Each structure stands twice: as C-alpha cells, then as structure tokens.
Image (tube, helix red, strand yellow):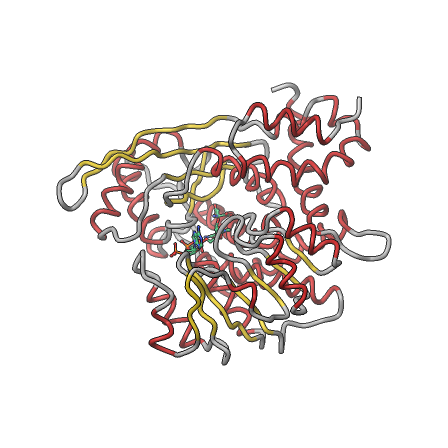
Amino acid sequence: MAVNLSDFMDWVVARNPGETEFHQAVHEVAETVIPFINANPVYEKIKVLERMAEPDRIISFRVTWADDNGEVQVNRGYRVQFNNSIGPYKGGIRFHPSVNQGVLKFLGFEQTFKNSLTGLPMGGGKGGADFDPKGKSQHEIMRFCQSFMTELYRHVGANIDVPAGDIGVGGREIGYMFGQFKRITNSFEGVLTGKGLEYGGSLMRPEATGYGAVYFLEDMLHHIGQEIEGKTAVVSGSGNVATHAAEKILHRGGKPVTLSDSGGFIFDPDGFTQEKIDWVKEHKKQRGARISAYVAEFGGEYHEGKTPWGVPCDVALPCATQNELLGDDAKTLLKNGCKAVSEGANMPCDMKAIAAFHDARILYAPGKASNAGGVGMSGLEMSQNSARLHRTEEDLRLALRKIMDDIHDACVRHGSEPDGYVDYVKGANIAGFKKVADAMLAFGVV
Ligand code: NDP
Ligand code: 2IT
C-alpha cells in the first residue's frame, strides 16, 4: 500500500504532540522522500520512514550546579540518540534557553540525513540543555559543563556517541566537557569533536561549517555558470558559522555586508574586511556580547530587533538559528534580486520561505546539505583520533572541499528536474535517506 503524506504526518503529529519544529523537519523530508518510497516499495514494506521518524532513544537528565553567588541552579540536559544505522551517533550540543525535547528531536532527525550525505560513517544525534550562557562567568560555564558531563558520560563514547559544539557550545565548552569525561572515565578517547589542537582536535574544524556553506554556494553558482566574485552577501548570525561564512565570501571576492544576533543586525555598506571579521570573532567570544558594538568600532548601521533580509543582496546565508527567515522575508529577498540561498544554520528558512524560493526557481540549499562541512570535518577529527595522527591544514581543506562537492553532486543526481532546475531539498533528502534506509534494510526488523 502506498504511503500517503497527510496520513503519515497525522501519525507523526499525534505521537509527538506540540513538537512543532520536529513536525516541520519531518514534513520537509517526507514530502520529497515519500514519492521515492512509493517507487521503491521495499522501503514501504519494512516501514523505514516510520522507523526513521522515531529516535532510537532520548535521554533526559537534571543538571545541578552552583552559580558564583552560591545559589543552586537546576537545568535540564538531553541527548537524543536518533539513528546509529551507519555509524556512532554524532551531532552537536546546544546550550540555549529555547532548548527542549522537540527542538533536539528536529536537530537529531536532520543530523541523520546530513551525516549520511557526508559519506562518512556517522549516525545522527543531538543534545543540549536549556542553560543560558549569556552573562555567565567563566567559572559558572565550567561548573555547568562539568555537571552536564557528569551525567552524559555514561551514554557517550568514541564508538557510541560523539557530541560536538552547536549554539552556545564552542571550543571552550568542549574543553571543559572533555576534561570532565577524561577525569571520570580515565579514558583519553575521541568522545567529542571540536577539541583543542593540543588534545586531539583537528585543524579546520572551527572554520569548516561556514567555509563549507560557501563552498556549497559556489558549487551551486558554478552549476549555472556564475561566481561569488563581485556578489553582495547578506549573512545572519555572528557566531562560529556566520563569521566563517562571511570570511570565505570575502576570500572569494564577494562582499559580505551584514551580521546579526538575537538583538538585531548590523549593516556595513562598505562590506567587511578581515580585520572587521576578526574583531567580531574576538568580541563574540564573550558569551552575551552584542553585535551592536560593531557600529561604535567601525561605523555602519545597527537595526535593533530586525533581521537582515531587507538588505538588497545577490546571495543570502542564514547562519543563526531555526525559523529566522520566513515567507515574507523570502519575498523581500526575491524582490531585491537575491539569486541564491545557502543555509549555514539548521532549518533557518520556514516552509513558506522554501516554497517561495522554489517557485521563483532560485538556488536554495537546505542546511543538511550546505552546512554538512562542520560535521564532515568532525568525522575527519574522529578518524584522526582513531589513527592517532594529525592531518595538515592543506590536506583537510581539500578534503572539506571534496565532501561539499560530493554532496552537491548527490543533490544534482537525485534532485534534477527535466528542465535542468535542481531541487536541492529533494536531492539532499533522497540521497541522505537512501544510505540509511539500505542499512536498516540489511539489519532486518530492529
Ligand atoms: P554560535 O553560538 O557560535 O552563534 C549563534 C549565533 O546565532 C549568535 O549570533 C546568536 O546570537 C544567534 N542566535 C542564536 N539564537 C538566536 C535566536 N533565537 N534569534 C536570533 N539569533 C540567534 O552558534 P553556531 O554559529 O555554532 O550555530 C549557528 C547555527 O548553525 C545553528 O543553527 C547551528 O545548529 C548551526 N550549525 C552549527 C554547526 C557548527 O559546527 N557549529 C554545524 C552545522 C550547523 P546571540 O549571541 O544573541 O545569542
Ligand atoms: O548541526 C551540526 O551539524 C553541528 N552542530 C555539528 C555536529 C558535529 O558533530 O560536528
């Protein structure tokens, strides 16, 4: 019997009440994968999509810690181990007050397809806590990370589940968590990625997500005979992904003109230089620092409470968070002549925005394809840890380029329409799905 999208979604919504981001992520995949399943009934027979929409397990735990005033604080931590059919669970840890089970389920679900697309042996997972790092002291962050790992350590391991960074978790937090894992288990292993270079980290990991999103943008533009050079880019966010995306646009001769945070966005009509981007990187290291301070340093405009999508551009890179670019924003971008969108963040464009890009036949890359460079480099950090060696920066840069090019090729293979237009959503979903589904098929009913 053929799978029907609306029946399938009714089933998903009924069993995951209130988890709207998760419904959205599953819907986007189901819409493009169900026709493929119906054309290949072997997948329907083993209920592979139903099984993929159900995490292997969800771990939730209390994180208790004391702040600098000696007050006891209680947060909730999670790890969603979504699917380990093609490798150990792998995916970031997010510290943000908006973290809840539904958000982490959407992220873990997306991660399963993304990791499959990298071509490396990694399953999908995601974790985090509703902890707000903004305004916390270094010691408070350290105590929180230690308490978080004191529970998480029993669920992770180099061959079990390998977390990394995400919003609110960077090199510093990974260091604290790695230190605590090592202390509790007495095991020095590649249990986390995004580590410092002194203790098993990989060159290029900090840059990989943002650079990869620009490589993917470049692949899409090359496919239609265009270049980044000379193009104006609007970038949102001002963290790890956004600053490195802006930097790579600059390397390619493009002109990045905006960055943002949860308070608003800055517009620099002259475009960012390396010096300006380096300043933002340094400034935003203090968790809670505001992007608005840029204007006092370098000029330009600050627009409080606004997102940057109204600034005229040729290409857009949403690199902050989910559902930050909505249907009306997409219409504004299109009206202003935007020709390509490459997602650095996970699910930054809502369904209406994606439909608008698709209807206008512009280039649109979903995050599971375009931001896969980060986890791709994490996969290479894992293999360096297993082999106990370090690869050079040049070697890793080429490897990242190849991962992104291969994902682009897979999208073209599975997403090309008769008139030559590439539906990157369809291409990424089918290519990501197929590898995981075939592994599940091999395992039988488990
Ligand atoms: P960071 O913590 O380094 O930066 C996050 C940025 O996004 C900050 O500028 C932050 O502003 C902004 N932001 C966060 N939440 C909101 C919000 N609700 N509204 C507006 N702005 C917001 O995180 P990353 O750069 O690592 O992550 C950014 C995105 O990229 C996320 O979607 C993440 O899942 C995705 N991603 C990250 C990868 C990685 O390797 N790090 C890999 C693949 C995807 P503020 O300072 O005000 O909070
Ligand atoms: O969303 C993501 O791909 C990440 N936050 C990175 C995950 C990883 O394991 O490197």
Q: Residue, x 26% and y 47% (percent of image)? A: 141
Number of numbered callouts drawn:
0
Closest to the observer, 308 or 305: 305
Task: Identify the residue at the far right of this view.
Answer: 418
Looking at the rendered image, the quarter that the C terminus falls into is top right
In the picture provided, is 268 more to the left or to the right than 297? right
Q: Where is residue 397 in the image (x, y as percent from the top left)?
A: 54, 63
In the picture provided, is 210 more to the left or to the right than 315? left
Q: Position of residue 148 (x, y in %)?
A: 31, 37
Q: Residue, x 25% and y 38% (percent of image)? A: 183
Quarter of the figure with residue 279: bottom left
Q: Where is residue 441 in the image (x, y as percent from the top left)?
A: 69, 26
Quarter of the figure with residue 101: top left
On screen, residue 253 above or below 188: below
On screen, residue 66 above or below 166: above
Q: Residue, x 65% and y 26% (percent of image)? A: 10
Task: Identify the residue at the far bottom of this view.
Answer: 270
Quarter of the figure with residue 97: top left
On screen, residue 11 above or below 117: above
Q: Residue, x 72% and y 46% (percent of image)? A: 426
Q: Where is residue 243 in the image (x, y as percent from the top left)?
A: 45, 64
Closest to the observer, 292 or 162: 292
Task: Identify the residue at the far left of this view.
Answer: 70
Looking at the rendered image, the quarter that the N terminus falls into is top right
